Image (tube, grey):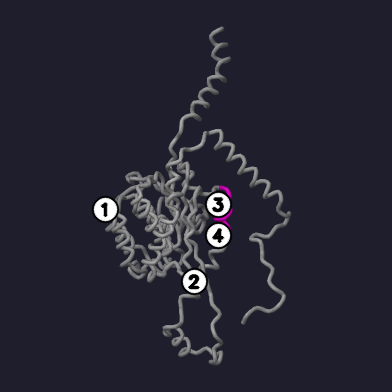
Amino acid sequence: MAFLFSVAYNRPLFCFVQIWSDDMTQKQPKIGLALSGGGVRGLAHLGILEVLEKAEIPIHYLAGTSMGGIIAGLYSAGVPLSRLIDFSLHTGIMDFASRDPHLRGLFGHTKMSQMLTDLIGRPDMTFEELRIPTTVIASDVESGEMVLLNRGPLIPALLATSAFPIIFAPVRYQGRWLIDGGVLNNFPVDVAYHMGADRVLGVNTPPTVRLTLPPSDPQPNRLSGRALFTSFTNATVDWKQPLLIAETGANFTVNIVDHERLQRNPPDLLLQIELHNTGTFSTDKNADVIQKGREIAKAHLDEIKALGSEPLPPRWRRQLRSLRRRVRRAWEVFQQPEYGLIPEPVQAPASGGER
């Protein structure tokens, strides 16, 4: 009885000593890399990875969506960056084009599956064999659920995370019909934390458009087949701009969701890569996009190195910081109007705009 009382009495002291001991031990952080979707813009991730690799900065977890998911999977599978970059410079959207026999998308996945197999070297690579723990994001088109793919066959998962609606058909995988993960989580910083990362480097490549006011058209405002053909064959006319405007507009909703998600799980370092007027399928800009990734990574190299070199603060301090962040977020919600507008609108001027 006296022994049991002694154990029970001294347990709080033992726990305190254990926590104090843990806090005194400096722990080197596990670094997660979160790669956003963005089609061609996502090729900037190759430039980022190239700089990290040359600087010998270790990555312990990879999370990616769409193009970010493809690059994460291929890199973790051991495909050399030099080969991925060379492949990207000599590949266009039509190289992936194959017929979808069920007409669920403009293209099927036959050619893309074969290209991924050629890059990896075998068709049966699994997530369990990857050299870096990797998760790619997909969306269940029937249930609307976000699906985390990190077990089983790799290539079908890479096809699923990049199955851009309308362009590519949904992928049947693990009993689900899956489409591009960017529909629900285009920038999976939260997934990298969920995998176990202590610190996360997030790389985001959102669509941005910059328009100019063209000179007045002296031609009559009349549409004809000949006028339409002339517009699309005129070398001075950027016929991709309507597609880019549509993509940017559709992405506003995705940005709202991503913004709310980042408020809850902000990366320790965010690299925002702005590639103006570069659409998802603008494959004529591949080299420029990869170079932009290199430039951004080099400009922030000291900050990136610090993520892995600076020891984590004591556990009690990390918990306190988490509590402060939650209280701050709750206070921001409390200060908002009862019936707020999301996103917050900008008041248009009373006078007419430019024409």
Residue that extends furthest to the right in the rendered view of this protein = 338
- Badge 4 element: helix
From this view, report whether residue 41 is shown above or below residue 16. below
Residue in the picture at 41% in, 83% down? 235
Of the residues under marks 1 and 2, which one precedes in the sequence? 1
Residue 181 place in picture, x, y as percent: 47, 56
> Mark number for residue 262?
3
Q: Which residue is mark 4?
A: 255
Instruction: For marks 1 and 3, give the CA distance.
Output: 36 Å
Of the residues under marks 1 and 3, which one precedes in the sequence? 1
Check disc 3 and give the amino acid type.
Answer: Leu
Check disc 1 and give the amino acid type.
Answer: Arg
Residue in the picture at 64% in, 45% down? 328
Instruction: For marks 2 and 3, give the CA distance.
Output: 25 Å
Tag in front: 4 or 1:
4
Q: Which residue is mark 1?
A: 122
Check disc 2 and give the amino acid type.
Answer: Leu
Q: Which residues are magenta?
A: 253-264
Decide if residue 327 is on the left or right side of residue 11. Answer: right
Characterize the local packing of mark 4: few (<14), some (14-19) or many (20 or more) Cα atoms within 10 angstroms: some
Residue in the picture at 61% in, 39% down? 323
Of the residues under marks 2 and 4, which one precedes in the sequence? 2
Residue 212 appearing in the image: yes
Instruction: For marks 3 and 4, give the CA distance.
Output: 10 Å
Tag in front: 1 or 2:
2
